[in-house]
Amino acid sequence: MSNHRYFVLHKPANMVSQFVSPDHVGLLGDLQFPFPEGTHAIGRLDSHSEGLLLLTTNKKVTNLLFLGEVPHKRVYLVLVGGIVSSETLSQLRNGIAIRIKGGGDYVTSPCDVDIIPRPNWLPKGKSEEYDVPRTWLSIALTEGKYHQVRKMVRVAGHRCKRLLRVSIEDLELGDLQPGKVREIEENDFFNKLRIRNWKQTDKTIDDPLVKIR
């Protein structure tokens, strides 16, 4: 029987996806949740982004989720300034050229983008304090370049005001509030992430030949 543990966190804004940092920033340890020794974040959200962040004591999950042959769908809710036109939606859906780390342009893969009502379960952020035109989008991706969503909407002519990840495959944030954590059972965790080979692989993120995206 596995002794590993798995957690879903609604990461609030202005917090990095780390327990330690040389910088003076909000840390996961500030949440005052009794995470067991060896817990780490699976992937990351930048400090300004919010929403679904997975944590575990199982080192091999990062490779299984982000370095497997089958890409995993991630859904983001994005608040942008201004009114998004149908032409812009088409541009975002069909692929848009963004600048990537190291220089050069990258054309994003086709993805699902829709205009949605404001999520009524979500506490309002500072970017929503003023009565100005804005649009909420739902963007579903299977790739994850550095700051990809923010760059996509910026190139399309809109500034990203707020960004929340709400699901990875079938594992959803649900109505979990900012800063709150829930623990999830191991089989349920892997089934909802659609990771089928987790019992067979022994490769871990300690492998120096593995590069995490």
Image: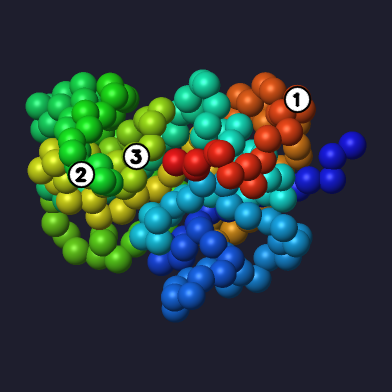
- Report whether residue 131 is seen: yes
Residue at left 49%, top 28%? 72
Tell us which disc is closer to us: 2 or 1: 2
Tell me which amino acid carries mark 1: Gln
Residue 66: percent from left, percent from top: 52, 34
Identify the residue under disc 1: 200
Task: Residue lying at the far bottom in this picture: please name it.
Answer: 24
**Callout 3: SS:** loop
Residue 73: percent from left, percent from top: 46, 28
**CA neighbours of label 2 inside 10 A, class few (<14), some (14 to 19), many (20+):** few
Tell me which amino acid carries mark 2: Gly
Nearer to the camera, 142 or 129: 142
**Callout 1: SS:** loop
Marking on residue 145 = 3
Tell me which amino acid carries mark 3: Lys
C-alpha span from label 1 to label 3: 28 Å
Q: Quadrant of residue 24?
A: bottom left
**CA neighbours of label 3 inside 10 A, class few (<14), some (14 to 19), many (20+):** some
Identify the residue under disc 2: 103
32 lies left or right of 37? left
Residue 93: percent from left, percent from top: 23, 25
| Chain-order first, disc 1 or disc 3 | 3
C-alpha span from label 2 to label 1: 38 Å
Marking on residue 20 = none
